[in-house]
Amino acid sequence: MVSLHPFPSQLHKIVMTTNIDLAFEHLYPVQSYEPRMDGRIAIPSVCNYLQDIASRHADTLGFGYHDLEKCGHFWMLARLHVTMERLPRFGESCRIETWPSGNERLVALRDFLLHDEKGLIGKATTSWVTVNTTTHKPDNPETVLNRRFIPKRDRATIFPTKAIKRLKGGEHDIRLVARRSDMDINNHVNNVHYVEFCLEAIPRSWEEKNRCLGIDIQFRSESHAGDEYVSACAPADPDGPHATFLHSLTRLSDGREVVRMRSWWIQA
């Protein structure tokens, strides 16, 4: 875990103003380095957008990275579920709207709607924990958040299952090593790189003919530069019309499952 300033012995809620907009929008033009060979961005680019806008909005509301640092906490993404109707191309833009959507036990929820110039193209939801920098354990999100900052509106989407099914045996696998450039501000492997690591196990022959339009990923353990993994995947029972894969990322040094993921695909 990242080492931050010692937190006060008495926990205090972050003081935030009430005259704020509880939803936040930002426009993400597709950059020249993002599209794949089919001319469209891939799911990891979408995940980068979601991570960025969540951080931007938390900063404006008063519970961003530096705000939590002052009271001895930091955000850690616990789960991410995103589904897209289509993926933008180079020259297009993605407009994203986000808002805090609830607190459940030890997690804070945040939802997202994604639009192109013609309308809605995707939905996402996330769960986050507020990790105590002294105990390295989650505290109740209401330690630093206040329910009055959750707007009364419909959810964008919900997690499809209570937990992601475990992959018992992978048909395809590959070995990977986390690089220093994969680290984030908390000195852990960045969440989006885990998505990329899981997708690396997909056979190239499959990816050439199919496009991933959705994922549900559960982050189970942090890891660091130099950690070695086995990324494995296998086809699963399809969810509706979409072909489905289960994924696992396991650390070789201790056999720990770092992330668990489900992905959805359509023919390209």
Image (cartoon, helix red, strand yellow):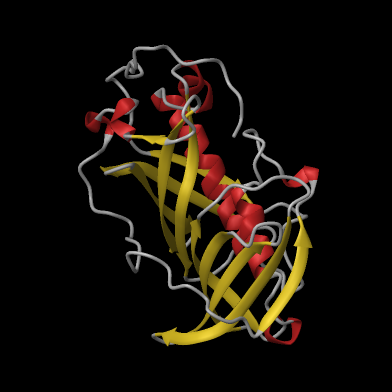
Image quadrant where one finds the C terminus = bottom right
Q: Is residue 143 left or right of residue 60?
A: left
Residue 132 image position (x, y, % from top left): 45, 29
Residue 207, compared with residue 39, is above or below; it is below
Q: Is residue 125 left or right of residue 34?
A: left
Task: Tell me where residue 148 sits by quadrant.
Answer: top left
**150 or 222, which lies in front?**
222
**200 or 229, which lies in front?**
229
The reply to whether residue 42 is in sight is no
The reply to whether residue 106 is in sight is yes
Residue 41 image position (x, y, % from top left): 66, 63
**227 or 260, which lies in front?**
227
Residue 248, compared with residue 146, is above or below; it is below
| Residue drawn where x is 42% and y is 43% of the image | 128
Residue 65 image position (x, y, % from top left): 52, 27
| Residue drawn where x is 65% and y is 57% of the image | 254
**92 or 136, which lies in front?**
136
Image quadrant where one finds the N terminus = top right
Residue 259, compared with residue 62, is above or below; it is below
Most extreme residue toward the front is 254
| Residue drawn where x is 51% and y is 21% of the image | 69
Residue 107 image position (x, y, % from top left): 35, 43
Residue 9, compared with residue 206, is above or below; it is above
Task: Tell me where residue 239 sits by quadrant.
Answer: bottom left
| Residue drawn where x is 72% and y is 57% of the image | 34
How many numbered discs, if any?
A: 0
